[in-house]
Image (spheres, rainbow, N blue to C red):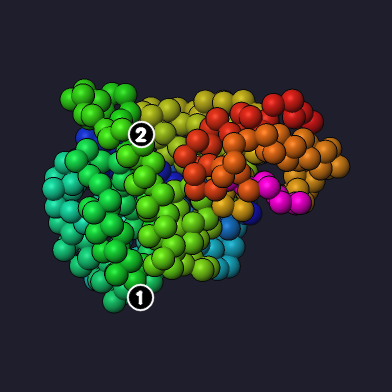
């Protein structure tokens, strides 16, 4: 499998916690961006993709016409598989049933919306421009338009938050009948308004409690954890994001977009003006090595599977897996699940996954 990612770098305003690259929306800039993105697609004409993902920024700001032009450009330039998952991100504001109907008619079949919380105070803290009621209405409008594969984002570890507010957000999202929920721990990124304001987050133990509660509560409501931060009803996992976590190839187009293509990694600078002027992507070295493969696969609930290691690295991959499996036996109890053919992390293990991965990789070479 391979995925196509198109980064749409426009937002109506910057949320104070956000570190993704975006610029204020302006009609002239968006039109130039669409033209340049289409032109750059021709660099990889004929490539085959199983998923397409429009991320941002706020891609919905391009409207149905702009998004349709980009998707049609991808279809005419690349080979997009029949039944491909085609996702677009949107905010709960400024949308209508007609907008969602237009998306569905254009070929989009999955929607990802940033709800973040069902608590008005938390939404205000996060700089979100919608209310819980508006988020619910946006989901209902999308469903009425025939878009049923919907993902909602929620955040945990917020200042002043706790299990009560988090539980409210989880139940609110599940009650809307969406098939996928992403639950992210808030992190203060350098250079963001939250960092400059010195926002203080809850203690690590409190955040860990919230995370484990989130896993348990979502599981109780029928959402299976399949990745550190992602939960889905059966069959509604994000196929595009699984491309990343399985170490498969993906091509990114747009300022700030990263790629793993042809065994190498490269990215476009976070510079819209440079992108519009044809600035070439920056090489970021080779990709797909054993350590990277282990790190990505261990983000998944199924973890690292011996057969996948052999498929990727040949018979040496089997011996390498056995070394990781041996190392896993020396990890603290309750953090790692060790099977005959797989190694994976428990929810408690996901909380300290970086340290565990380093321990598993000790002395493991191919």
Residue highlighted by disc 2 = 204
Please tell me whether residue 160 is drawn above or below residue 143 in the rendered image. above
Other residues around mark 2 within 10 Å, as few (<14) / some (14–19) / many (≥20): few
Q: Nearer the viewer, mark 1 or mark 2?
A: 2
Question: In this rendering, does residue 292 appear at all?
Answer: no
Please tell me whether residue 120 is drawn above or below residue 174 in the rendered image. above
Residue highlighted by disc 1 = 146
* 162 sits left or right of 153 in the view: left
* 149 sits left or right of 324 in the view: left
Q: Main secondary structure of the magenta part?
A: strand
Question: In this rendering, does residue 236 appear at all?
Answer: yes
The residue segment tinted magenta is 338-345
The residue at the point 28 percent across, 57 percent down is: 167
The residue at the point 31 percent across, 73 percent down is: 143
Q: Quadrant of the C terminus?
A: top right
Q: Is residue 339 magenta?
A: yes
- Circle 1 sits in a helix, a strand or a loop, which is it? loop
- In-front residue for pair 200/30: 200
- In-front residue for pair 242/101: 242
Q: How far apart, in angstroms, are the residues tagged by discs 1 and 2?
A: 41 Å
List x then y, in percent, for residue 330. 67, 34
- Circle 2 sits in a helix, a strand or a loop, which is it? helix
The residue at the point 25 percent across, 47 percent down is: 162
Which numbered dot is residue 246? none
List x then y, in percent, for residue 317. 79, 40
- In-front residue for pair 265/69: 265
List x then y, in percent, for residue 336. 61, 44
* 138 sits left or right of 85 in the view: left
Q: Is residue 359 magenta?
A: no
């Amino acid at each position: 499998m391979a995925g196509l990612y198109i980064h749409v770098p426009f937002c109506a305003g910057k949320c104070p916690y956000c570190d993704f690259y975006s610029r204020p929306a302006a009609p002239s800039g968006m039109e130039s961006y669409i033209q340049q993105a289409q032109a750059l697609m021709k660099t990889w004409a004929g490539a085959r993709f199983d998923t397409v993902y429009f991320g941002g920024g706020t891609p919905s700001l391009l409207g149905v016409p702009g998004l349709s032009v980009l998707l049609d450009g991808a279809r005419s330039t690349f080979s997009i598989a029949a039944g491909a998952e085609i996702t677009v991100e949107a905010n709960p504001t400024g949308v209508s049933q007609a907008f969602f109907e237009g998306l569905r008619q254009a070929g989009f079949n999955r929607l990802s919306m940033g709800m973040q919380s069902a608590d008005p105070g938390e939404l205000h803290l996060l700089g979100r421009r919608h209310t819980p009621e508006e988020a619910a209405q946006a989901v209902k409008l999308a469903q009425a338009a025939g878009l049923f594969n919907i993902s909602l984002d929620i955040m945990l570890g917020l200042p002043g938050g706790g299990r009560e507010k988090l539980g409210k957000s989880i139940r609110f999202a599940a009650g809307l009948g969406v098939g996928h929920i992403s639950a992210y721990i808030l992190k203060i990124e350098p250079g963001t308004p939250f960092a400059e304001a010195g926002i203080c987050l809850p203690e690590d133990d409190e955040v860990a409690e919230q995370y484990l509660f989130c896993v348990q509560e979502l599981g109780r409501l029928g959402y299976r954890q399949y990745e550190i931060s992602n939960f889905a009803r059966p069959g509604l996992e994000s196929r595009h994001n699984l491309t990343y976590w399985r170490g498969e190839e993906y091509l990114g187009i747009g300022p700030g977009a990263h790629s793993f293509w042809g065994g190498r990694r490269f990215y476009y600078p976070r510079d819209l003006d440079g992108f519009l002027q044809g600035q070439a992507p920056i090489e970021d070295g080779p990709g797909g090595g054993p350590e990277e493969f282990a790190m990505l696969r261990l983000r998944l609930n199924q973890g690292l599977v011996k057969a996948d290691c052999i498929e990727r690295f040949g018979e040496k991959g089997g011996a390498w897996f056995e070394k990781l499996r041996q190392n896993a036996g020396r990890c603290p109890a309750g953090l790692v699940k060790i099977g005959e053919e797989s190694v994976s992390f428990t929810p408690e293990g996901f909380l300290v996954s970086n340290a565990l991965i380093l321990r598993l990789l000790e002395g493991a070479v191919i």
